[in-house]
């Protein structure tokens, strides 16, 4: 079931259901893409119609952030729980490892995806790294050929918002691989950036942990409460059904 929250059609799912749905997409073998819609993505999509279209064309849109969950509550469109890309992706990698599946990593600074790939192979024995590429190359033609040739089961795109969602929309018909825009997750897999400890995540304070670890994100993060203001406004004015 879809719940439209601030123009974004979220799939109303638990983590388990999202894993099942994504895994079914992968096993179908026809490609498709998943948007891990956090507050930053919701706000960007409201300002940029082509970006909104790229988000809306996804096969699966998961609620990646506590701001989205609260916005849903304010608008009486409850989502069962937060389903982050950072939780979903490891679950999918574990499933792929069990059937000797493969993943391709595209994104982050030179050398990072390689290191992430090495770590993932060690963490998920059986998982094959079909290839890696940094997110700053100018010509993507060889990369696309390589992905077509290697036919990975999953392509993780760490190109940042909005580039990764535009990329998935633009290339979905050329590739028969399931793609997920993962933001900085390749850096996390490489060990460059630490994810918040569980207690922060469970309490919905992952943003606070990130702010402490990466204070230069302050300006970017100041925008985040805006999602709640928009939700309250929409609730009062009732611009959407
Ligand atoms: N990035 C990239 N190519 C670009 C712009 C960004 O590969 O043209 C990478 C960047 O190096 C980082 C990721 O995209 O690894 C974005 O990380 P960020 O922490 O901003 O993402 P978030 O997790 O906040 O969505």
Image (cartoon, grey):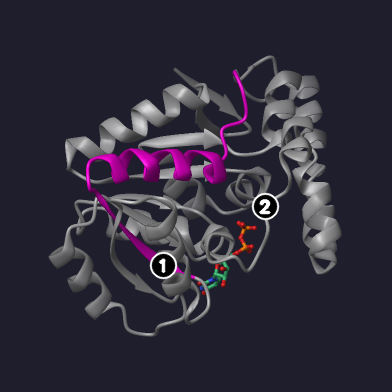
The picture places residue 48, in percent across and down from the top left corner, at: 57, 54
Residue 14 vs 171, above or below: the answer is: above
Please provide the residue range marked out in magenta.
80-107
In magenta stretch: residue 84: yes
- SS for tag 1? helix
Q: Is residue 9 left or right of residue 30?
A: right
Tell me, yes or no, if residue 129 can be seen here.
yes
Is residue 58 visible in this depiction of the protein?
no
Q: Is residue 127 above or below residue 90?
A: below
Could you classify mark 1 by the number of other residues whose Cα lies within 10 Å: few (under 14), some (14-19), or many (20 or more)?
some
The residue shown at (68%, 28%) is 69
Quadrant in which the N terminus is drawn: top left
Frontmost of labels 1 and 2 is 1
Q: Quadrant of residue 65?
A: top right
Mark identifier at residue 195: 2
Q: Is residue 215 magenta?
A: no
Give x and y (percent) for residue 136: 46, 80
Q: Residues within 10 Å of mark 2 (few under 14, many from 20)?
A: some
Where is residue 129 shown, x and y percent of the image? Answer: 30, 62
**Local SS, label 2:** loop
> Disc 1 to disc 2, how far (Cα)?
18 Å
């Amino acid at each position: 079931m879809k719940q439209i929250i601030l123009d974004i059609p979220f799939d109303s799912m638990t983590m388990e259901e999202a894993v099942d749905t994504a895994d079914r997409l992968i096993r179908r073998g026809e490609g498709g893409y998943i948007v891990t819609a956090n507050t930053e993505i919701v706000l960007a999509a409201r300002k940029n119609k082509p970006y909104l279209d790229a988000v809306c064309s996804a096969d699966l849109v998961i609620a990646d952030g506590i701001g989205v969950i609260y916005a849903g509550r304010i608008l009486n469109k409850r989502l069962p729980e937060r389903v982050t890309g950072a939780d979903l992706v490891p679950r999918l990698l574990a499933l792929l490892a069990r059937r000797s599946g493969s993943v391709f990593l595209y994104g982050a600074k030179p050398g990072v995806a390689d290191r992430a790939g090495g770590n993932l192979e060690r963490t998920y024995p059986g998982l094959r790294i079909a290839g890696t590429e940094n997110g700053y190359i100018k010509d993507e033609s060889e990369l696309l050929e390589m992905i077509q040739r290697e036919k990975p089961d999953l392509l993780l795109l760490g190109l940042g918002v909005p580039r990764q969602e535009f990329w998935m929309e633009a290339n979905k018909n050329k590739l028969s691989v399931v793609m997920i825009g993962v933001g900085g997750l390749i850096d996390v897999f490489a060990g460059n950036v630490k994810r918040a400890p569980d207690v922060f995540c469970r309490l919905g304070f992952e943003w606070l942990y990130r702010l402490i670890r990466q204070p230069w994100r302050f300006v970017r993060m100041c925008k985040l409460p805006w999602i709640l203001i928009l939700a309250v406004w929409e609730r009062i004015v009732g611009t959407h059904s």
